Amino acid sequence: PEACAGTDDAAVEDTDEAFTAPRLATLAATLVCVAAAAVALRRIDDLLPARDGHRASERLAYRIDCWFSSNPNAKILALLYVSIAMVLVGGLLLYGVSSTGFGEAVWENVALVGIDFTAASATESSLSARVVAVASALGGMFIT
């Protein structure tokens, strides 16, 4: 069957290419890892035993507090670490829900997290990719 004039075959191919098995596996693995990290952080006292009468969450808070008070670059490094994590996680999620390549997805997420917050509406056409882009832009706004 021939395509009718005015139809966009490229848009259909992009949608088909977006949900391949490797992309869905990347999306699922990223979501599982983020959820596992959130649960582990939330339940850290149940996962690690108390030592010297102090819970694991208290020891972690103390170590972070010591790091911030003893290292003059701690705030900058913390911002750097969180930004890198957001770019990588957002890039993996964007790769999983869109038809862009992994490098391009990470690069688009760099723009969303810290450089250009208006890219959230301009870069993607599918709803799921726009949700990831807006979440990355909002995360970048809250961090910076």
Image (cartoon, helix red, strand yellow):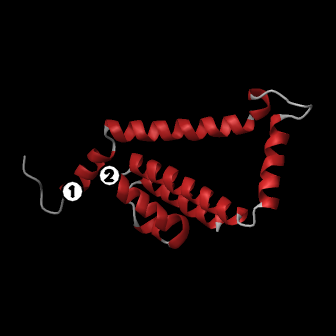
User: In the figure, 144 relative to 61: above or below?
Assistant: below
What amino acid is at disc 2? Ser
Q: Which residue is mark 2?
A: 99
Q: Which quadrant of the figure has residue 100?
A: bottom left
Q: Which quadrant of the figure has residue 137?
A: bottom right
Q: Which residue is mark 1?
A: 10
User: In the figure, 57 relative to 80: above or below?
Assistant: above
Q: Is 19 on the left or on the right of 51, as rendered?
A: left
Lower position in the chain sequence, tag 1 or tag 2: 1
- Asked whether residue 117 appears in the rendered view, the answer is no
Q: Which quadrant of the figure has residue 139?
A: bottom right
User: In the figure, 23 relative to 106: above or below?
Assistant: above
Mark carried by residue 66? none
Front residue (pair 63, 116): 63
Q: Residue at x 12, y 61 (%)?
A: 5
Q: Residue at x 43, y 57 (%)?
A: 106
What amino acid is at disc 1? Ala
* Secondary structure under the numbered disc 2 in the rendered image: loop
Q: How many marks?
A: 2
Q: Position of residue 36 (x, y in %)?
A: 61, 35
Q: Position of residue 96 (x, y in %)?
A: 40, 46
Front residue (pair 142, 44): 44
The span from disc 1 to disc 2 (Cα, nearest Å) is 11 Å
Using a 10 Å C-alpha cutoff, classify the residue at mark 2 as few (fewer than 14 neighbours), some (14 to 19) or many (20 or more).
many
Q: Is 22 on the left or on the right of 40, as rendered?
A: left
Q: Residue at x 85, y 41 (%)?
A: 58
Front residue (pair 88, 71): 71
Q: Is 9 on the left or on the right of 42, as rendered?
A: left
Dots 1, 2 in contact, CB < 8 A: no
